[in-house]
Image: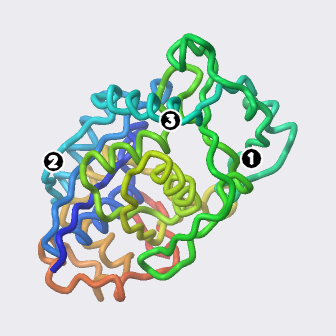
Amino acid sequence: MSFSVGRFAPTTSGPAHPGTLLAALLCWLDARSRGGRVVLRLEDLDPSRCRPEYAQAMVEALAWLGLDWDGLETQSDATDRHAQQLDALAERGRLYPCACSRQTLRAVGTRARDGSFRYPGTCRSRSLPVGGWRSVTEALRVRLPAGRVEIEDAGGDDLGADPVADTGDPVVRRRDGAMAYHLASVVDDAAAGVTDVVRGRDLAPSTAVQVSLQRLLDLPTPRYRHHLLLLEARDQKLAKFHGSVGWPVLREIYSGPELCGLLAHAAGLTEEPAPVRPESLLADFDWANVRTQDRPLLWRSQRLVLG
Ligand SMILES: [Zn+2]
């Protein structure tokens, strides 16, 4: 049994929904079934979307589901650590200010694989002002090395990509001063000694960018494993479960073990959606039994119905 550290890192921009809770369950089972540690990291860096009450409710929802953690971190407590790594990128000549608006990027009009608009590198030749990155009032991007990053998912999928060609250089500090997702995520993973990142398939396209950043910063690359998503009906089609129903509603209808049983069954871990505690799933947990296809989970007449 190899030593492993996992992490569950939800963004605290709204109530936990079934997709969040399934991701938490799979992450926890992955670590604990191997005798590893698993920490909860609350990603609250986006001041326009995150609220302390969502963070508090996230902690409560996960406990209600029956999950416990070997540590709890709040990402906004670690901004000094993020700033140090911006210093490191600046020293290596990799940071540059970018004044391009979202409208500009949309006008260029190339979609990246993650659905965002590709950054065409308009400001790539700019350098930092004499006052350093802290004096910049625009967004800051990192000049990533060109070329393909080879990486394989623990489940066997090829995650290799050329981040510069695909998404373009990522923003590492936003114009409003908030540290951006990729930078904070890789820096905090390394600080916590994370060896295994388990997360939803929607984040798979961002792996190559994150590995490229790790290499620039001399940070280790963890193993990545991406899992199925729960889908909900939205605009006449199925989309990633986003919160048509949140935990404040779910807790009125289900007990923690009831919802845990439903999620475990949705993921293919159990034959029946019978109530279960997460620790009862540990002995038989095996990724070979986890369904790989995304799964519709519809909200019908105040119940979750598996599709
Ligand atoms: Zn720009």
Front residue of this view, candidates 6 and 93: 93
- Residue 263 on image: x %, y %: 33, 70
What quarter of the picture does the N terminus occupy? bottom left
Q: Quadrant of residue 267?
A: bottom left
Which residue type does callout 1 highlight?
Arg
| Residue at numbered disc 1 | 118
- From where the camera sits, is residue 101 visible? no
Crowd class of label 2 (few under 14; some 14 to 19; many from 20; radius 10 Å): few
For the point 21% across and 52% down, the residue is 39
Q: Quadrant of ligand 1?
A: top right
Task: State which mark lies toward you, 3 or 2.
Answer: 3
* Residue 84: quarter of image: top left
Lower sequence index among marks 3 and 2: 2
Identify the residue at the far front of this view. 92
- Dot 2 corresponds to which residue? 71
Q: Position of residue 240 (x, y in %)?
A: 55, 60
Residue at the image point whose x is 18% and y is 53% from the top: 64
Residue corresponding to mark 3: 89
**Gap in Å between the C-alphas at discs 3 and 1?**
21 Å
Q: Amino acid at mark 3?
A: Leu
Task: Mark 3 and ligand 1: say if the CB distance to the nearest ligand atom is below 8 Å.
Answer: no
Q: Amino acid at mark 2?
A: Gly
